[in-house]
Image (cartoon, helix red, strand yellow):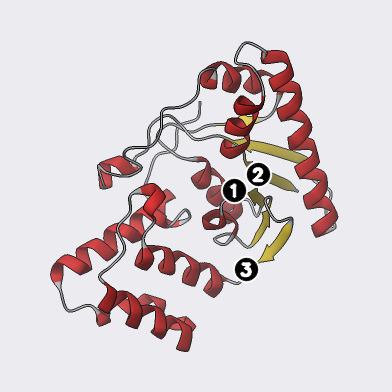
Amino acid sequence: MTLVIDADYMLYVTLYHFKKDDLESQCEYFTKRMDEVRKEVEDATGSQYTETIIAFSDLTSFRNDIYPDYKKGRKPRPAGYLELKAAIGKRLNVQQWDNFEADDICGWYARYEKADVASQDNDVYNQVPIGYDIKHGELHINTPNEMDVAMRIKAIDGDRSDKIKGLPKQYRDKMKEMLTMVPHCGSDLWKMIDDREVMLQYNTNLELVDINLLHEGREITWS
């Protein structure tokens, strides 16, 4: 079985804990933490993973082609970011795809390879069948409908940290209420929108937040 770890966050944590020129300590700390995460997930799932993939985001994202303001205004990456990522790539089983994020790698492996996923980000572990919440040490087992609801709520609410705007309140409230009352209605939510601009926004948000659907029709290149 395969475990995919969304490791972007831990890359930043490592850089903030060690001096930028202490590459050996950085790599040792990162490797130790990945081993700990794998063991935590094995204990939670009762599985033994024969392969562990460390997923990193590329420096660019195709989402900026869909929405130019995506993640606009974030702080620059800390000093030593690229050096540490390259060093880890020589030690561990790292995957980074051109113009894709670590979320997408997790989604692809969960969908097409039946892999389990571990992440700090609830947008990831709530959108895969078996996702481990690294921050809280909790295992999430999601049905297809639960994954769909989680994705649609993100599209409705938006995400301030990613600069994704939520829908206007009058649509946001009634659509989330409908999802609560009828969880299987997700594919019909668009019928509740009577404004063309809001419809376009909702469709764009769906493209931005769905880590599984975005692989369809796209060429994946490996680096």
What x and y, as percent, mark residue 134?
Answer: 69, 50
Q: Residue drawn at (80%, 58%), measured in percent from left and top?
A: 45
What x and y, as percent, mark residue 46?
Answer: 85, 58
Q: Residue drawn at (26%, 41%), measured in percent from left and top?
A: 65
Which residue is under mark 2?
4
Residue 6 vertical position relative to residue 112 in the rendered view, above or below: above
Q: Report the side of 173 relative to 113 (left or right).
A: left
Who comes first in sequence, dot 1 or dot 2? 2
Q: Residue drawn at (74%, 27%), measured in percent from left and top?
A: 29
Observer able to see residue 30: yes
Q: Report the side of 99 relative to 89 (left or right).
A: left
Q: Secondary structure at mark 1?
A: helix
**Which sits in the foreground, 56 or 156?**
156
Who comes first in sequence, dot 1 or dot 3? 1
Which residue is under mark 1?
109
Give the class, few, some or many, for how many residues have Cα within 10 Å of label 3's Cα (few <14, many ≥20).
some
Outermost residue on the left side: it is 196
* Displayed quadrant of residue 142: bottom right
Q: Residue drawn at (57%, 62%), measured in percent from left and top?
A: 126
Give the class, few, some or many, for how many residues have Cα within 10 Å of label 2's Cα (few <14, many ≥20).
many
Outermost residue on the top side: it is 21
* Displayed quadrant of residue 50: top right
Residue type at mark 2 is Val
Which residue is under mark 3?
142
Asked if the residue at tag 2 contacts the one at tag 1, i.e. Cβ–Cβ closer than 8 Å, the answer is: yes
Residue 196 vertical position relative to residue 189 in the rendered view, above or below: above
What x and y, as percent, mark residue 222?
Answer: 50, 30
Residue type at mark 1 is Tyr
